Image (cartoon, rainbow, N blue to C red):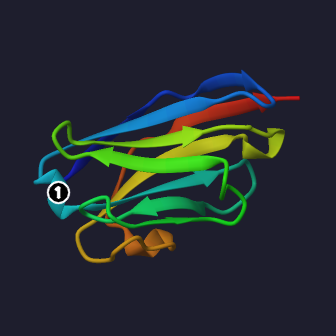
Amino acid sequence: QVQLVESGGGLVQAGGSLRLSCAASGRTFSSLAMGWFRQAPGKEREFVAAISWSGGSTRYANSVKGRCTISRDNAKNTVYLQMNSLKPEDTAVYYCAASTVVLHGTRPDDYGYWGQGTQVTVSS
């Protein structure tokens, strides 16, 4: 089993920045591909970013490309999502996810483990 705990969400003004963190436990972290998803009220969960086991490759949704950076620290069992130039449309619950099978997948079904989510609210 893998346990994931997100932190770092909050309320920020448009144009501001936030860094989300996700701490993993229960399995060798370097064996997990990691991803971030988000879900706004009334909408489906959507892919934000993903990173490979080693951190050597990343993938981003077009909606956040150039504004977000995913990274990981395997020594700390933590994956991060740095979000800059935030927009009101970025408001959502952000979820961390882990996969033992798929390398930087973009579909929720690619991931077998999920955190509880952290709320990000961007005011205009």
Name the secondary structure under disc 1. helix
Name the residue beneath numbered marker 1: 30
* Residue in the foreground of this view, choosing between 73 and 10: 73
Image point 39% across, 48% down: which residue? 71
Side (left or right) of 23 relative to 64: left
Side (left or right) of 88 relative to 80: right
Coordinates of residue 88 in the picture (x, y in percent): 82, 38
Name the quadrant containing residue 85.
top right
Q: Is residue 1 visible?
A: no
Please give the count of numbered marks on the rendered protein: 1
- Residue 107, relative to residue 72: is it above or below? below
Side (left or right) of 109 relative to 49: left
* Residue in the foreground of this view, choosing between 20 and 73: 73
Image point 38% across, 67% down: which residue? 57
Name the quadrant containing residue 32.
bottom left
Q: Quadrant of the C terminus?
A: top right
Coordinates of residue 69 in the picture (x, y in percent): 52, 48
Q: Quadrant of the N terminus?
A: bottom left
Coordinates of residue 67 in the picture (x, y in percent): 66, 48
Image point 59% across, 33% down: which residue? 119
Image point 80% across, 46% down: which residue? 89
Coordinates of residue 111 in the picture (x, y in percent): 37, 67
